[in-house]
Amino acid sequence: EVQLVESGGGLVQPGRSLKLSCAASGFTFSNYYMAWVRQAPKKGLEWVATISTSGSRTYYPDSVKGRFTISRDNAKSSLYLQMNSLKSEDTATYYCARIGYLPGYNSYYYVMDAWGQGASVTVSS
Amino acid sequence: DIQMTQSPASLSASLGETVNIECLASEDIYSNLAWYQQKSGKSPQLLIYAANRLQDGVPSRFSGSGSGTQYSLKISGMQPEDEGDYFCLQGSKFPYTFGAGTKLELK
């Protein structure tokens, strides 16, 4: 069974840093792209970061680029999100997601096909 | 960035009723469209990917259609367990973007 378990959330002051972890099990972690997605309280979902299988390629939206860093340790089947210079608008539940490579009609598609239970991050003084 | 306009924002359906939710992309996303269900206090669950492919284990009353910029999710026969929030996600181009969501309730 695929399991993704986030940890490291909590209350942090604006301008400070926090690092989230995601422990993966039930699949060959090193074969999958991975992602972080967040959801502000009572709001919709926002993609935060994606990392390639080896970790050599990373992708971010402008809202977190330069402040957040996604990384992975394939030997430990773990995904990380280092968050620096945190702002109140970063307050959200952060989900770790596996990106599967799934077959379509005549092509394959990268799809977030498994999600963790989420880690809550509150940025407040 | 590709904008995903999802409608309606909320709806209420009776048991057995057919439900339709739509997502309109600001540009062609070449069927790189997924639908997720999120129940209260839970993480999102994948329902449909590649616009119309049913994820393993998802009931067949869920179906997806569309191409280009217009996509829809259909629930053929509303069930109590279908209550929740539904989101579309485009994976055609970075930054990936979600629709704002549809809150579905049982009438």
Image: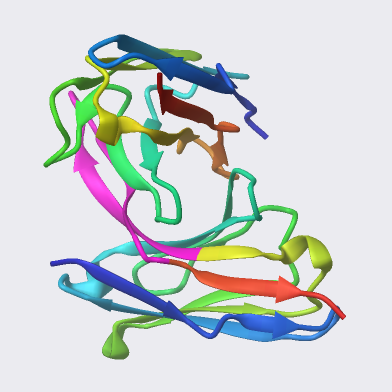
**Magenta span:** A95-117
Instruction: Point out residue B75 in the picture as x, y percentages from the top left corner.
Output: 28, 18
Q: Is residue A27 above or below residue B82?
A: below
Residue A1 horizontal side relative to residue A79, left or right: left
Quarter of the rendering occupied by the C terminus of chain B: top left
Instruction: Point out residue A22 in the picture as x, y percentages from the top left corner.
Output: 41, 78
Instruction: Point out residue B37 in the picture as x, y percentages from the top left corner.
Output: 37, 39
Count every numbered label the image shows and give the total: 0
Q: Quadrant of residue A28?
A: bottom left
Instruction: Point out residue A86 in the picture as x, y percentages from the top left corner.
Output: 78, 75
Residue A51 horizontal side relative to residue B5, left or right: left
- Please say whether residue A25 is visible from this viewpoint: yes
Residue A45 in the magenta stretch? The answer is no
Q: Residue at x 62, y 19 (%)?
A: B26
Of the pair A69 and B42, the residue shown nearer to us: B42
Quarter of the rendering occupied by the N terminus of chain B: top right
Residue A62 horizontal side relative to residue A45, left or right: right
Q: Is residue B89 above or below residue B64?
A: below
Q: Residue at x 30, y 42 (%)?
A: B46
Q: Residue at x 75, y 69 (%)?
A: A66
Q: Main secondary structure of the magenta part?
A: strand
Q: Residue extending furthest bottom?
A: A76
- Please say whether residue B49 is visible from this viewpoint: no
